[in-house]
Image (cartoon, rainbow, N blue to C red):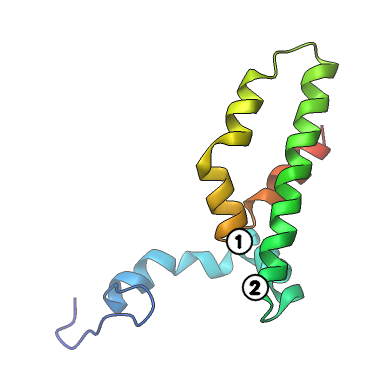
Amino acid sequence: MRRNSRKHATTGYIDDQFDALHHGLSASIAAAVSGSLYSLFGANITAMKAVFSIFEFLTLLLAWRLLIFWNRSIQPLLLMAWHPFFIFEFSGSGHSDSAMMFLMLLSI
């Protein structure tokens, strides 16, 4: 680590550590897809979080229909639906994983 490193303004990481952790992310396909999703909303964070919440809800509906179709128990789905992690991360933080989960289940 360089002696003149400063802490990153947003994350609090040392600049060198931040660059080492996130350097490969910019070249990945996932970053390109997420970036295009985020660019649709611009500065409207509330709309972005709302859309990802809708994707989460649609994922739960689709998983429910698939479980009924395959004659499986819906208990694990109920645990996922009420687990705070999914609520806070997708709806509260605006993570794009809910869109990915929906598209994966839709492909089945």
Please tell me whether residue 13 is drawn above or below residue 102 in the rendered image: below
Q: Which mark is residue 94?
A: 1
Q: Which residue type carries mark 1? A: Gly
Apparent side of residue 18 relative to residue 43 in the rendered image (left or right): left
Which residue is label 2 attached to? 45
Give the residue drawn at x 73%, y 36%: 60
Name the element at disc 1. Answer: loop
Rendering quarter of residue 26: bottom right
Badge 2 crowding class, 10 Å Cα cut-off, few under 14, some 14 to 19, many 20 or more, is few
Residue 19 percent location from the top left of the image: 37, 73
Residue drawn at x 74%, y 44% is 57
Which residue occupies 81% across, 18% down? 68
User: From what the image shows, is residue 28 above or below residue 69?
Assistant: below
- Reply above or below: 19 against 85: below
List x then y, in percent, for residue 97: 63, 51
Front residue of 18 and 70: 70
Q: Give residue 61's position: percent from left, percent from top.
A: 79, 35
Q: Is residue 106 left or right of residue 10?
A: right
Work out whether residue 15 or residue 10 is closer to the camera in this orientation and state it. 10
Give the left or right position of residue 100, taking residue 6 as reference: right
Q: Earlier in the sequence, mark 1 or mark 2?
A: 2
Going by the numbered disc 2, the residue's amino acid type is: Ile
Circles 1 and 2 in contact, beta carbons < 8 Å: yes
Locate the C terminus and report the quarter of the image it occupies: top right
Q: Which mark is residue 44?
A: none
Packing grade of label 1 (10 A; few <14, some 14-19, many >=20) is: many
